[in-house]
Image (cartoon, rainbow, N blue to C red):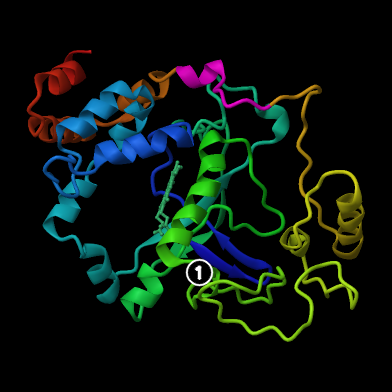
Amino acid sequence: MKFYTQQDNWDIVENNVPVFFVQDAAQFPDLVHANKPEPHNEVPMAQTAHNNAWNNFYNEKSTSHMIMWIDEALKLSGQDPDFHRKAINSGAHPKWTLSVQVLPESRQHEFDFHILDATRVWPVEEVPLGDIGELVLNKVVDEYFPETEQVAFCTSYIVPGIGFGDDPLLIGRNFSYLDTQLSRLGTNWEELRINRSVCPVLNNTRDGQGRHTITKSKVNYYPNRFEVPKLAAGGDDLRRHGATNKPGENFIEMAKVVEEQGYVDYPETLPAPTFKTHTKGPKFAEYRNQVELFSNSLSGYEKEHVIEAFSFELDHCDEPIVYERMVLD
Ligand code: HEM
């Protein structure tokens, strides 16, 4: 989802199931490779019913929860891959309630899983869903290429009031989407019509392939000898001017923004001395609890459905090491 707000665009790049395959962005390229058609023959297209995918699911235990959720989509897309667009065109407008789960920092250690582990759900009984709106798909695009092919959803596109947690998946995603968009669409992809902000953008970046905007000004940096650029509402412009929240001169800028606009990033509590390392804490190593919970919560019919889906997939794997281990272990 792309929200064209008065303080720049906010992209929510999410899925319609609450869990994900892996816990760390570094695992993602291998997951994607294993899920693609096998490299020696490009078979099967657009399916995970093959040796490499299921070999990866077996070896990468963090995928256990997610593979329980993938089901019905195969059937629907197999019969008519365009069913969703056709449904919208025919007036059937699918809608969802958009909800968020919010946890005060003081409760972060209450759970037997790590709250930033994307392969887990936060139980709704303990962290209730707060409804914030309704999402309705009521229109398909007018032209495919400029609106769909060229749209770029980027996790690092946020607006004042929203920050990033330490989720090892999200931190990696913040680099990965931008990287992809730079190679897929080129520099200045933010200026393509579908990606453009509805508010003025003052990042002082003027060059590069694909630049659309013409700025009438002698200076392309800030602070400068002419004036302090008028800051749009929100602290966002400070980030655009390259400021960090390190103490020192940027702190003075930060203080100015707080004074003028009343917003500052949520301060992160860190015990001192603090070192960030690329490791996952012990809670990330437990994979079975929620898979069992999910499985036990299914009705008889739903369980049958999962068994059928697994059987279909594994039936297409022809290396015993893949299908035997998956069933027996
Ligand atoms: C919670 C986990 C994740 C979710 C919910 C998610 C969701 C999505 C969605 C919905 C898209 C399609 C966006 C579009 O239609 O343009 C997408 C694309 C993409 N995802 Fe993810 N993803 C996740 C994890 C990751 C990770 C871990 C990486 C990389 C380390 C990654 C890299 C990408 C890239 C590069 C694209 C293509 C972006 C583009 O070409 O514009 N994703 N993801």
Q: Secondary structure at mark 1?
A: helix
| Residue closer to the observer: 136 or 226 | 226
Does 283 lie within the magenta span? Answer: yes
Asked if 42 appears above or below 328 in the picture, the reply is below
- The crowding category of the residue bearing disc 1, from other C-alpha atoms within 10 Å (few below 14, some 14 to 19, many at least 20), is many
Q: Please name the predominant secondary structure of the magenta segment in the image.
A: loop
Does any portion of residue 20 appear in the rendered image? no
The residue that disc 1 covers is: 189
Asked if 300 appears above or below 261 in the picture, the reply is above
Asked if 255 appears above or below 58 in the picture, the reply is below
- Point 76% across, 62% down: residue: 241
Amino acid type of the residue that numbered disc 1 sits on in the rendered structure:
Trp
In this rendering, position of residue 87 left or right of residue 172: left
- Point 57% across, 27% down: residue: 278
| Residue closer to the observer: 178 or 47 | 178
Does 29 lie within the magenta span? Answer: no
Does any portion of residue 166 appear in the rendered image? yes
Q: Position of residue 302 (x, y in %)?
A: 23, 35
Q: Position of residue 264 (x, y in %)?
A: 81, 52
Magenta span covers which residues? 276-285
